[in-house]
Amino acid sequence: MRTWRRHLHQFPETAYAEHDTADYIASRLQDFGLTVHRGLAGTGIVATLTAGNGSTAIALRADMDALDIEEQNDFCYKSRHAGKMHACGHDGHSAMLLGAARYLAQTRKFNGTVHFIFQPAEEGRAGAKRMLEEGLFDLFPVDSIYGMHNFPDVPAGHFAVKPGPMMAAYDCFEIHITGQASHAAMPHLGKDPTIAAAQIITALQGIIGRSIDPADAAVISITQMHAGNTWNAIPESVVLRGTCRCYSSTVQERLKTRIKELVAALCQGYDIDSMLVFNPENPGYPVTSNSERESRIAAQVAAAVAGAGHVDLQPTPSMGSEDFAFFLQEKPGCYIWIGNGSSEGGCLLHNPRYDFNDEILPIGAAYWARLVETVLA
């Protein structure tokens, strides 16, 4: 597993371009004797293994895409692709699921069917949604689906899981504010869009405190501001970009409604035009919410593998987002975190110094194998 993981780390590929990654994974799966289907969402892989005569089928999912980040590590297996890096551990996720597939193909101590999903484009490009749209569960019917993600600062080899929300819903937005350019010394002759932009940035934070129930967690962040190109001219337009996140579909829609209302009202007040677009390039993500029964099973399996004292049953949900949520809208299932250990030295998700912890590979693969043997007993 370490060899597989480090190979994948050296040759990262980003969303929908995971061609060599998919070739490498598919080759391993074929060597193990699994039936391999390719092509869903372009580079996606579904490998199938059946034992006994049971009618129950489950799916296990690993993501396999990298990020557009320049790696700053110096070890021998660092990225060889400039500007691309496995900065979220998808190399480790794929290696753990490959390890479980190999073990289960050798032992076959289960009764039913397991589909191993190696999914492209988790990082903001909704590969899960595209696999569903292209018929994933029509081609490979399942009763439940399970996912796993490493988590820095959770002790190595520990697990965290609970029913309900684990990861937040996510929407991004783009606001175009258009006024009338003027000389900086004569602003009264124009319509200054920067004043409206400043008011919008401030007003959006009031949504969290006044339009959303204090018991419901949510966050709005402006992440980009673009305006002007000289010192002595008020620009004609400003572009703001940002994200909003929360833990329920109701709050998700409320956030979007209030953002629209505030942008329109403030720009009208300054007599300038506005245009607001949600998710202009990629779809938003729903809440990653675990089902009750599957969460109990996952917790029991994690305790059997790591010890009951090493499973956090009340983790604080993350405001990060995950397109595994699309699978959970279609099927009952559970998304669990496995501890990656300390984040010292920049070993945080999406950090240029991040590296997956190879010491947890056997624990993660054991969780997958025990889960299959438990659900398909």
Image (cartoon, rainbow, N blue to C red):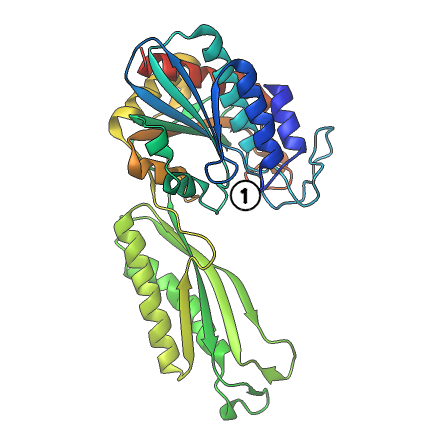
Q: Who is closer to the viewer here, 161 or 273?
A: 273
- At 48% from the left and 47% from the top, the residue drawn is 124
Query: Where residue 322 sits: x, y (%)?
Result: 42, 40
Check disc 1 and report the residue beneath it.
15
Q: In terms of image quadrants, where is residue 333?
A: top left
Q: Position of residue 37 (x, y in %)?
A: 47, 28
Mark 1 nearby-residue class (10 Å; few <14, some 14–19, many ≥20): many
Rendering coords of residue 97 (x, y %): 49, 22
Q: Residue at x 74, y 28 (%)?
A: 76
**Residue closest to the eye, 260 or 25:** 25
Indicate the quadrant where residue 9 lies: top right
Q: Confirm whether residue 222 shows in the render.
A: yes
Is 229 above or below relative to 294? Answer: below
Quadrant containing the C terminus is: top left
Q: Quadrant of residue 320?
A: top left
Q: Quadrant of the N terminus?
A: top right
Horizontally, residue 198 falls left or right of residue 301, namely: right
In the rendered structure, the answer to whether residue 81 lies left or right of residue 330 reads right
